[in-house]
Structure formats: C-alpha cells, structure tokens
Image (cartoon, rainbow, N blue to C red):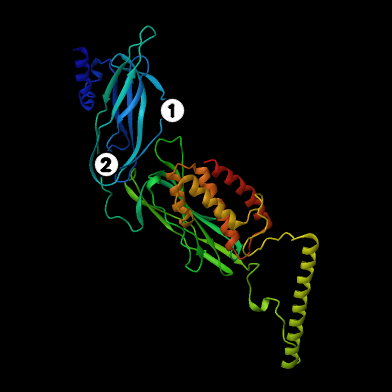
Amino acid sequence: MQCLLLLLALSIPLAEAAADPVQNRKSPFIRATVTGTGRPYVGEEQLLTYTLYFIGDAPQVSDESNPSLDGLWHSEIDPGRFVKSRPVTLDNAVYRSAVIRQYKFAPLRAGRFGVGGYRLKCLFTGNAGSSVTRTMLISAPSVVIDAKALPEPIPEGFSGAVGTFSSFEQSADHATRRTGEPVTLALTVRGKGNLQTLRIPEPAVPSAVHKRAPVTVLSLDSSAAFSAGSLTSRVTVYPQQPGKTVIPPLRFVYFDPEKKQYRTLSSRPLAIEAGQGEKSGTMDSLNFPRPDAAGPENAGQAQLKTAGKAVAAVLAAVLIVALVMKRFGKPPERADKKSGAIADESPSRPSPENFKAQMYSLIEEKTGIRKPESLTRAQLATALAAKNIPPTTSRQIERVLETIDRMLYSPAGATENEMILLGSEGKRLLQILRQL
C-alpha cells in the first residue's frame, strides 16, 4: 500500500505540484525551468533545465525517455561526467539539487509548443547495514513554449540572425601576393545569439578570381550558458591577373530581441594587390632569341645558330647524365616547382600526389567514408564529424590538403620549405590516421 501511494504521488503532474510548494514531500522530484525572455521570438535562444531534488545520498540516475522537442532547434549541454549537487531549502525541508539535463533551444516557427515526456530512473542503494536497493521512476513536468513571429516588415538581407551581435568584420591574411598564390578571406560575426544555426554570407569575390568552397568555423564560449562567441566564413582565393582586386563591403542584418528591432552591421572593403608571379609574364619577357637588326636573312641565320647551340647543349647534357648514371647510378631528382613531384618517396619527403592518395586511402579504410577524394572540403569535414573524428584531426586534414593543392596548382610551384613542412606534418598526420 505504501508503494502504491508513493507511485500515485509521483504520477501527479509536477507542473501543478509547483503551485503547491513541495507539499511537504520527502520523495525525489524533478523541476523543469525555462530561462530566457518567457515568450521568445522565432530563432531566439532559450535554456531548458531539468533539476532533480532529493534527500540523503545521491541516487544513480539514468534516462528512461527524452523530452519531446518537436518544432524546436535544440542542442544538449553536457552536464559533465559527475553531476554536482548543492543544498537547498524548500518549505523547511533541506534537499539537495542537481542539474540532470540541460538544453539550448530556439523555436523554428511561431506558435505554441509543449515540451514533455522526460522521465528519469533513480536507483537508491541501501545504507552500510542494508543491501536493499529501491528503484523509482520520476516524471518531469511539461512546459509550454509560446513563440512569437518576427515583426514585419522584414528588411532585405535578413537571413534569420537573432541575438545581440557586436561586430561584423572582413579580413585577409595577405594584402599583397604574387599571381596564383593563395589569399584567405574571412568574414566574422561576433556576439550572442543563434550562432549554431546562423547563415553567414561568404566574401563577395569577383568572378574572374579563382576561389575554393567556403569553410565555416564556429567558436563558442564554453563558460556561457547561452551561445556566445564568433562565426567565421573563410574563402581561399587565387588572384590570376596582376593588379588590385577589391572585395566590396557586406551587410549583416539581425533582429535584436532585447530592443525588439532590426539592426545592421557593415564590413569594410578590402584591397588585394597581386604582383607578377615567378612563372607568369608576357612573351617578350621570356628568353626567346631576338631577330638581328641587320635584316630578315641575318635574323634567320641568328635563329638557326641559336637553335644549333641549344641542340648541342641538350646533347651534351644528356651525355653527361648518361656518364654519371653509368659511374654512380641514378642521381636523385629535384623537386619540380610546377607539379611539386619529387622522386624521393621517403616518409620525410613524400611527393604531394602520393601523400594525398595515401591520406585519402587511410581515411576511407579507417572511417568507412566512401571515396573521400570526391568530396568537397565542407562535405569531408561533415562526414568526419559524423564518424566522431576529433575536430583537431579534421582541421589538420583540411590544412594539409590546402597545402598540397597550393603546391600542385600555384604557378609559383612548391618551395623547399613547403616540401619540408609537408614531410614533417604529413608524417604526423599519417600516424594519427593509422591509429584511428
């Protein structure tokens, strides 16, 4: 009979029980609270917290069912491996309280949403003189979220950003480069709001400039309850022609729920000056034989004479190489600055092409991602995250691939330092991939 009465007491909706402060209960119970404005706008972040109250020793807890969060974007906050409890007094009874589950959420549309269905199983062990344990199933109260639509009219350029944002900046890692050398452009928004679902524009690059797919980087303050930090969109571009390339300013429109109005932040324009690359230039700047000023006949003779010297030089070089190979064996080949390929295939000096193939092969073997070489950088990062690959490893893969592409496709070619750096960092990355 006592057990039946206990189950009946726990089955009372806790939302109603909150009106009756604790009702002198000594049994564990859960409270659900929402922190925020109370009636959030669409896209406005709120915090849902489930707190367990108990007396005596802390029970062992496990989830029996998760709350229903349909119609809400949500992300659970990890409370940590060991849940801390603190004392609290309710109606002259001293309880201990512990946060069991916590979610960031934001409404995806206007309307009323009921969040409920969360149940927790508690296992209470006996004291030192008893081995009796008891199990209790506790239901959390339901909460209602009443979301408001964003006010009309919605300004042009608004893409769903809701919060209080402080800055919107455009930057480049280099102001001057040679043609074909990479420049990384970045657009960064900072502040507090729905950063995890925000769509940030990418830098507006002229169509004549070759560019890679944008990469988005999110950096959140782990100590903040609500999402706060920065979101950056990075694009790597390769100027193809000498001269100045102007990156125009952009606007970032967001809704401020505290001021209840739309606001706009603007970035500054950028200018990138591209100089003549090592491999680029006009035909006149290359070392072609020039006609003699005496006339066409002399010009033709000069060209034939120059061609004969060139052929003789080539034959002499071939003969010297053949004699060296016969005496000492095949000499080591040097790096080809155009392709980045080298003959030395030792782990410390891998060729970019072969290293790229090894890396893709290990990714497919160790993670099960099919044909990773056919994916874009963003698609590969998403696939690695889905396979629980650490973010540091994913960023290292992206950085090495970017280095290899620069070595293979930049007209300036690969430098000796780049080959050495690829060898050392590439070796470490291959070891990491083999250990997955």
Can I make out residue 402 in this image? yes
Read off the residue under disc 2.
Answer: 70
Residue 84 falls left or right of residue 415: left
Image coordinates for residue 335, horizontal then vertical, percent: 68, 60
Q: Residue at x 77, y 67 (%)?
A: 322
Residue 134 falls left or right of residue 225: left
Task: Determine the CA span between mark 2 and mark 1.
Answer: 27 Å
Hey, which quadrant is residue 27 in on the image? top left
Few, some or many residues within 10 Å of mark 2 (<14, 14–19, 20+): few
Q: Amino acid at mark 1?
A: Arg
Query: Residue at the top extreme?
Result: 129
Can I make out residue 295 in this image? no
Read off the residue under disc 1.
Answer: 81
Q: Secondary structure at mark 2?
A: loop
Image coordinates for residue 176, horizontal then vertical, percent: 60, 61
Q: Earlier in the sequence, mark 2 or mark 1?
A: 2
Numbered mark located on residue 120 in the image: none
Image coordinates for residue 376, horizontal then vertical, percent: 46, 56
Q: Secondary structure at mark 1?
A: loop
Quarter that holds the N terminus: top left
Please state which of residues 131 and 20 is positioned toward the viewer in this rendering: 131
